Every structure is written in C-alpha cells, then in structure tokens.
Amino acid sequence: MGGIQGVGFDLDGTLYANYKLNIRLIPFVFRHWALLSAFGKARGSLHRMTSARIEGRGDFYDVQAALVAGQCKLDPGQVKEKIFRLIYRGWEEHFARIKPFPHVKETLALLKARGIRLGLLSDFPPRRKLELLGLDGLFDAVFSTEEFCALKPDPRPFEKLASSMGLSPGEILYVGNSPGYDIRGAKRAGMKAALIRRGILSTGFSRGKGGDRAEFIFRNYRQLLRYVVG
C-alpha cells in the first residue's frame, strides 16, 4: 500500500462486532419497537440524501426528527428528545461491556509508531463509545458524519476527515465493514479503501463494482497491519 500516510476507520462493525451490541439491545427493541422502526426508515432516507439536500431542509437533527415523527405521528420536538435520550445516550453505555476486535488497539498503536496519522469517521457520535471501548486518545481526528449534515456514502464527511488529518484523500486508506456506505463513500472522496470481513474465506478478494471496489479485504487486524506497513 505505497503512499499511505493515514488510515481512517469506521467504528460500528469495524472496530468491534455489531452482534455484541445487538444482543444487549434486545430489551430496548421490544420496549421501543415503533420508535426504532421509524428511526431505521428515517436513517435509510438520510443515507440516500446528499449533504446539500439535507442542509436545504435545516439542521440535521431537526430533519431526522421530522422524518421519524412522520412515521410515528408524534411531535418532532418530542421525537428529537427521545432519539438523543434513548438512542444516542442510551446505547452508548453498553460499550462499557463490549471489547474491540482482537489486536485493534495494538494495530492502532503500531500504525501511530510508524508515523501514520489515524482518523475515525462514524455515522453515529463516536467519542463516548471510543472512551468506553478503551480506544480514546489514539486518533488524530474523530468525527460523526452528522457533524457535516450528511450520512455515508456522501463524500463530504470523508473529505472533511482528510482535511482534519492534514492529508489529501489519496493519501488515506479508509477501513470499514459496509461496501455500500464505507467503501463507496471513501472511494467517491478519492480515498483508498479496505473492507473487513470476519469469515474464514473473506480475505484477499476485492468486492464491489467499478469505483466502489475495495483495494483489499481482511479478516483480522494483524492482516491489516501487514497490508499497510509490510
């Protein structure tokens, strides 16, 4: 991977296993099914909207709340408060009992020791999660795409991440678990991309079509380290 000066990471499903959170959310799903269903549909709509289109409708969180409220037939202000209280803040504390994938912290530390800048870009607010996962302080730049009035695969948050890392997009390898969101968004911004797949047969083959194709697939973080630094 010649020319790589920085590595950017997704968080959910990339630095830890999604199922570990999903298991802990089962009671929440039963209690708040209507809200969660509406939130999922709203996020799907937001993923398909450009940052310019979202900005044209107002503040990101107000637009999101309005979409959810339209599904639930509730007041947008009440919905916005519930989203922050139940989803953003409520889910974060589960991370105190979740561990990152093996060798994540070791890999990040070794990359930093090699002078490679590290960034993190997540569709959800990441800072408290990183703290609870024991990964805070390792990244040079940490953002949620929501801060830029967008969700992946809009390229704008990826471009902003590169700027904050002091690098051009072409100098960054972005690591994620979603071909449609992480890989596509990174490639649209001009970054290289790597896809994590945990299956035993999932390494060494590129997935995606055309410009959405990852440079490589890996299944553990020691493999990623070898790909980046040899």
Image (cartoon, grey):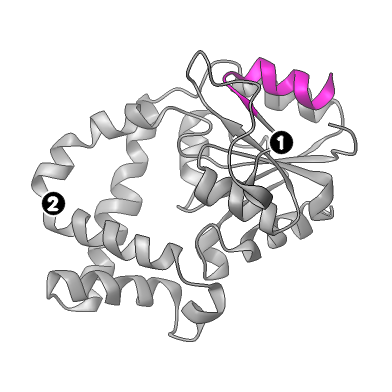
Residue at image location 37% in from the left, 42% down from the top = 92
Residue 32, numbered label: 2
Give the answer, above or below, for where 63 lies relative to 99: below
Residue at image location 64% in from the left, 32% down from the top = 206
Nearer the observer: mark 1 or 2; the answer is 1
> On the rendered image, what quadrant is the C terminus found in?
top right
Instruction: Return the x and y of residue 193 as percentages of the image width and height.
Output: 68, 41
Instruction: Return the x and y of residue 109 as percentages of the image width and height.
Output: 72, 24
Instruction: Return the x and y of residue 188 as percentages of the image width and height.
Output: 67, 58
> On the rendered image, what quadrant is the N terminus found in?
top right
The residue type indicated by label 2 comes to His
Q: Are marks 1 and 2 in contact (CB under 8 Å)?
A: no
Q: In the picture provided, is 85 more to the left or to the right than 59?
A: left
Residue for badge 1? 215
Give the answer, above or below, for where 44 lies relative to 226: below
Q: Give the residues drawn in magenta, as a range.
A: 217-230
State the CA–CA distance, disc 1 to disc 2.
Answer: 40 Å
User: Foreground: 222 or 103?
Assistant: 222
Q: What predominant SS class does the magenta segment belong to?
A: helix
The residue type indicated by label 1 comes to Glu
